[in-house]
Amino acid sequence: MARPHIEPFVETDVAWKKMTLPGFGRGMRYKILSLDTDTGACSMKVMLEPGYRQPPGMSYSEMELFVLSGSVTVGDQVHGPGFYFFVPAGVAMPALSAPRGAQLLMFYNYGEPSFVESDSDHAGAERHRYSVVNSYEGMSWTSTNFYPATAPGCLVKVLRFDQRTQAFTFLYCMTANFWQDNISYHDCAEESYHIWGTSWMMQFGDLPTGGYFWRPPYINHGAFACKYGTLALGRTDSQLYNHFHFNPWTTPEENLERAASRMQHWKPDLYKWVATGDHNHPVDFEYPGDHGHAHGDVPHHHGDHNVAHSHGPKRRRMRK
Amino acid sequence: MKLIRHKRSREAERWLKQEIREQKTRYRKIVAEQDALAPQREKWIAAFLERIQTRGFNVHADMLRKIPVEEIPQKPRRRFKVVF
C-alpha cells in the first residue's frame, strides 16, 4: 500500500535504534519517520556517534541526506548543519565520517536503506545528477512561486527540483505570527520535518520541533498558524499545486474529483484528449523510452499511431 | 535510474517486516490521538468558519474574500476523520 498517512508524528518521543542492515558502519542509530511497505523506501532521522566511519560506497536507491546538527566529513570536505546531498542510485560517495558525531535526515526514495562498499560508480549511475548544497549559508529565502500562493510569511529555498516529475525538496520557514485561513490539498504526496519551531493546523493541532508528517495526495490540511516561527524541510513526490477551499469536511475522494473537474476547466483540450479512450498512454518526446504506466488490457498507443493494442505476457524470443 | 535492481537480503527482509509492524503500531496511535482531539477540532473549525466570514478566506497570498453566510458549508452526517 505504499506509505500510509503518518501525521502528526513527533520523533523526539521515540528511542533510537541500532542500524543492523548490512553495509552500514557501527555507531549508526536511526528512527523511521515513514516507510513504504512495498518497496522499503523510507525517511529516517539518523544519529552518527562520534567516530563513525563508512568507507566509499553507493546505495541501490536514490538517496537524499540533510545535516541537522554536528558535521560529516565526506572525502576531505566537512559539511555542517544545513548541508544537503542528492545522491542518485549507484553513485559512489567518498568515505564518510563523523569525528564529533552528527544528526541527519536520510531519505531512501525507491528501496530500503542499502550500502554497498565501492570506490567506483555502478554502470548505470547518473553521476551528473549528484548535488551538494549549503542550504543555510549558500542560498536565499524566496517567496513561494506556487499559484495560488501561500500567505506572506511562508518562504522557501528549493534544494532540488526534478524536471520530469516536478517533485522537489525544499527548506521552508514560517515567520512569527504567520497565519493562513484556508484549507489546502495537493495532487502530490507531501512530507515535512520540523527542524525548529511549532506550527498549527486545524486538523492536527500543534506540530513542534521534531514533528513530522507524510501526507498522501488529496488530504485536507489547514487553516495554518505559527506563533514564534518555524524552520522545516519539505519534500513532494510530484508537482505541488495548492487546491484551496473552505469546507473542512470534504473527503480525499471528493477532493480528487474536484481536482479532476478543475483540470477539465483549466485545460479543456488536454483533458478531452486524455479522457478519450485510446489516449491514456501519452509519450513525452523528451523521454521516449519512459512510459511509467500500468500495462493492461486497456487499448493505448505509443505515440506511433498504433492505437488499439495491449501488452500481454512477454513473449519469448524465437531462436533462429 | 532511480533504483538498481537487486535481490533483497534476508537481513533486509527481516528488517522490513519488523519496521512495517512498528509503523502499524505508530499509525494506530496517531489515529487514536487524532480521534481524541475531535472535540477541540470542532471548536477550531467553528472559529475558522467565523473568521472567514469576518476577516476573510485566503484566496491567494494575502488576497482575502469574506465568505457570505449562505456559502458556509454544513457538517455532513457521515463520520468525520482527518487521518486516512
Image (cartoon, coloured by chain):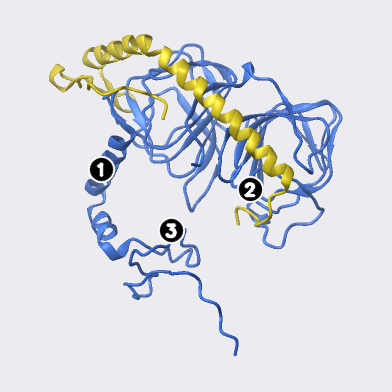
The colour of chain A is: blue
Point out the image quarter for the C terminus of chain A.
Answer: bottom right
Residue at 41 percent across and 16 percent down: it is: B35
Determine the CA span between mark 1 and mark 2: 33 Å
The colour of chain B is: yellow
A71, A141: nearer the viewer? A71
| CB-based contact (under 8 Å), mark 1 and mark 2 | no
Residue at 65 percent across and 50 percent down: it is: A88
Q: Residues within 10 Å of mark 3 (few under 14, many from 20)?
A: few
**Residue carrying label 3:** A294
Numbered badge on residue A262? 1
- In front of the other: label 3 or label 2? 3
Q: Can you give x and y, in whole percent of width and height, for residue B28 in the image?
A: 50, 23
**Residue carrying label 2:** A62
Of labels 3 and 2, earlier in sequence is 2
In the drawing, does residue A42 fall left or right of residue B42?
A: right
